Image (cartoon, rainbow, N blue to C red):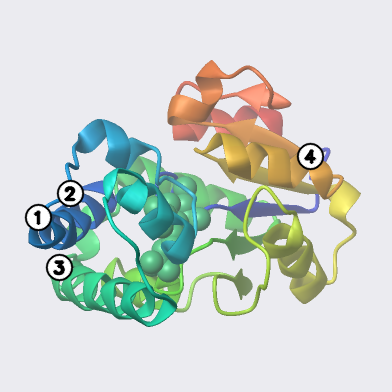
């Protein structure tokens, strides 16, 4: 083992990709409400909690909205989204991610998920990783979302490893900020790697094996 004892992975955008399902589900709600919504707006929802995502979708909504309405729309979005997640299968886990995870496991690292999603366990089961991780910290066990460090601090706690010995892997800027605020090193992948605020910027998921 090298610099770290554990690796904590964000889920959406790191282990697998659910953007298109979030997009379809939010677009259905936005169309129903007559609010403009496109993929650029959808990109702003990455790593953001469900209710905060709805606030972004409603930025262009004219008129007042009650709390009850917001809760109902978020629930409706989630029902559509979960229906679409049902289309996911083990084919949505890339060979590169699967083999990198296997190598890390063989190297003795403790592996956890740190995701804002309340659907994390369902997604993991769809892609064949339902029993793979040593710990899962997700939208169901936190009260503050990224960039607050809570989701990653909890993951480290569940693993029983000090934050300073954990590496976080993230695709969203808010997630990188969360890792740093929790006293953890972090590796950025995808869009987050362009911000240049992470400890490491990865070109490919398997580059992880060179930095742990
Ligand atoms: P849910 P992550 C995040 O997952 C997604 O990136 C974000 O787009 C979504 O709004 C959030 O989960 C909440 O998801 O509605 O399923 O609870 O990237 O933190 O794994
Ligand atoms: Mg993400």
Q: Is residue 109 visible?
A: yes
Q: Earlier in the sequence, mark 4 or mark 3?
A: 3
Q: Position of residue 139 (x, y in %)?
A: 54, 71
Quarter that holds the N terminus: top right
Q: Which residue is tagged 4?
A: 180
Q: Is residue 147 left or right of residue 53?
A: right
Distance between mark 2 and mark 4 Cα atoms: 35 Å
Instruction: Provide residue 116's location: percent of width, then percent of height.
Output: 53, 62
Residue 91 occupies quadrant: bottom left
Against 145, residue 167 (above or below) is above
Residue beneath disc 1: 31
Q: Secondary structure at mark 4?
A: helix
What x and y, as percent, mark residue 167? Answer: 73, 44
Mark 1 residue crowding within 10 angstroms, few (<14) / some (14–19) / many (20+) = few
How dense is the environment of label 2, judged by Cα within 10 Å: few (below 14), some, or many (20 and up)?
some
Residue that carries the numbered disc 2 in the rendered image = 35
Q: Say whether disc 3 or disc 1 marks the residue closer to the N-terminus.
A: 1
The earlier-in-sequence mark between 4 and 1 is 1
Q: Is residue 13 above or below residue 68?
A: above
Q: In what element is the residue under mark 1? A: helix
Quarter holding the C terminus is: top right
């Amino acid at each position: 083992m090298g610099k770290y004892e554990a690796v904590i992975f964000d889920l959406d955008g790191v282990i697998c990709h659910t953007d298109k399902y979030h997009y379809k589900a939010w677009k259905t709600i936005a169309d129903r409400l007559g609010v403009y919504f496109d993929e650029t707006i959808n990109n702003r929802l990455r790593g953001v909690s469900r209710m905060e995502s709805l606030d972004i979708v409603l930025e262009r909504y004219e008129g007042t909205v009650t709390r009850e309405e917001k809760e109902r729309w978020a629930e409706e979005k989630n029902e559509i989204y979960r229906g679409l997640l049902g289309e996911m299968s083990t084919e949505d886990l890339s060979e590169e991610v699967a083999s990198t995870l296997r190598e890390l496991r063989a190297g003795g690292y403790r592996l956890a998920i740190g995701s804002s999603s309340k659907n994390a366990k369902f997604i993991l089961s769809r892609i064949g990783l339902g029993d793979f991780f040593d710990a899962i910290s997700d939208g169901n066990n936190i009260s503050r979302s990224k960039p607050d460090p809570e989701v990653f601090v909890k993951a480290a706690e569940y693993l029983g490893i000090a934050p300073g010995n954990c590496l976080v892997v993230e695709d969203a800027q808010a997630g990188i900020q969360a890792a740093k605020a929790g006293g953890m090193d972090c590796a950025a992948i995808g869009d987050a790697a362009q911000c240049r605020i992470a400890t490491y910027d990865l070109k490919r998921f398997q580059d992880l094996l060179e930095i742990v």
